[in-house]
Amino acid sequence: MNKQFAKDIIEGLSSERKTLSSKYFYDDAGSRIFQEIMNMPDYYLTNSEFEILSLQAKQIIEAVNYNQPFNIIELGAGDGFKTFKLLEYLVNNHIDFHYVPIDISQGAMDELTKKLKSKLPKLSIHPKVGDYFEILSKENVQTKIPSLLLFLGSNIGNYTKKEAKNLLQLFNNNMKKGDSLLLGVDLKKNPITIQNAYFDKHGITKRFNINLLLRINREFDGDFKVDDFDFYCHYNPVNGEVHSYIISLRDQKVVLNKLGKSFDFAYDELIWTELSKKYSLEEIDNLARESGFKTVNHFLDCKHYFTDTLLVKH
């Protein structure tokens, strides 16, 4: 049983404003549903970032400007779909580097390594499984060669302003002077475009959220009746925040037998599941500066929906 998951469920569902963390969305079923989300025409994020890394790999590496062998350390590498184009450019142009993907999933790392070795046999790959910061403190700070860190996919948007600043400061603390960070960030844009991406009419995002209740049922012998819950999300164009919620459709009690706990839900009560913050370029620059970085360049897709922003540690 995942002790941290259990602790977070009890804390989140006992609080006055109920919450369940989005980091628990990604069990096997959740990961499959997220693949469906990424394939939706309205979900622009994956294609936007893929375009940047496909068409601007040369410009990104020139802006990094390392005149010696270097590491590319990817934080939360997953399936490596987008990063492949950047790696392909480097290998094809005989640039001397080592790719160090980091993920908490051994299965994901094994799969990624196998795939990359078949597609890019000359790639120097050193996968690591575990916590970003434990690995960075050993693998990065104590090495002489410079590193380019990748934190892609707009993951920074899942953090509050304070959390995002703390996270970037942690990255900074585990980097050497002159190391770079390529940060994927979703940008503020027409609110309708964002709303459609996160509240799709086919109900895929709803299934993605409700799957979290099914996961809790399975792992903690719970009796969430998923038909008694609905999904809603809202984008606020002023502060750039998307908030996602699961809604209780009636007064009900849910029992989690393995935890020996029960939780009461009122009619129309909300469970907050996810924050997805959208940034302006100015906000990114400010966040970078407050975290000890200097902005080198914003690499944008053709619609200016997304940026991979290159930062350097002072």
Image (tube, grey):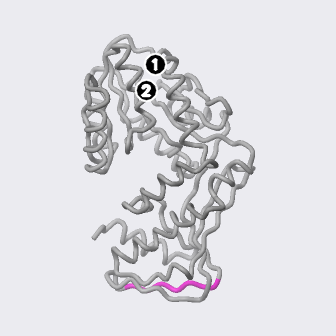
In the rendered structure, does residue 264 fall within the stretch colored magenta?
yes
Q: Nearer the viewer, residue 179 or 166?
A: 179
Marks 1/2 in contact by CB < 8 Å: the verdict is: yes
Q: Amino acid at mark 2?
A: Leu
Kind of element beneath mark 2: helix
The residue that label 2 is drawn on is 86
Q: Residues within 10 Å of mark 2 (few under 14, many from 20)?
A: some
Q: Which residues are magenta?
A: 261-267
Residue at 26% across / 33% down in the picture?
Answer: 139
Answer above or below: position of 145 versus 26: above
Q: Residues within 10 Å of mark 1 (few under 14, many from 20)?
A: some
In the rendered image, the residue lying farthest to the top is 67
* Dot label at residue 301: none
Secondary structure that dominates the magenta span? strand
Task: Give how far across and how far down residue 79 sits, in percent.
Answer: 38, 43
Answer above or below: position of 168 versus 4: above
Number of on-image labels: 2
Answer above or below: position of 155 versus 96: below
Cα–Cα span, label 1 and label 2: 9 Å
* Dot label at residue 61: 1
Does label 1 or label 2 sit earlier along the sequence? 1
Kind of element beneath mark 1: helix
Q: Amino acid at mark 1?
A: Ile
Task: Indicate the quadrant containing the N terminus: top left, top right, bottom left or bottom right.
Answer: bottom left
Q: Nearer the viewer, residue 225 or 62?
A: 225
Task: Give how far across and how far down residue 281 sits, in percent.
Answer: 66, 33
**Which is more foreground, mark 1 or mark 2?**
2
Q: Nearer the viewer, residue 168 or 48?
A: 48
Residue at 39% across / 24% down in the picture?
Answer: 88
Answer above or below: position of 37 versus 13: above
Asked if residue 59 lies left or right of residue 10, the reply is: right
Task: Give how far across and how far down residue 46 sits, in percent.
Answer: 54, 42
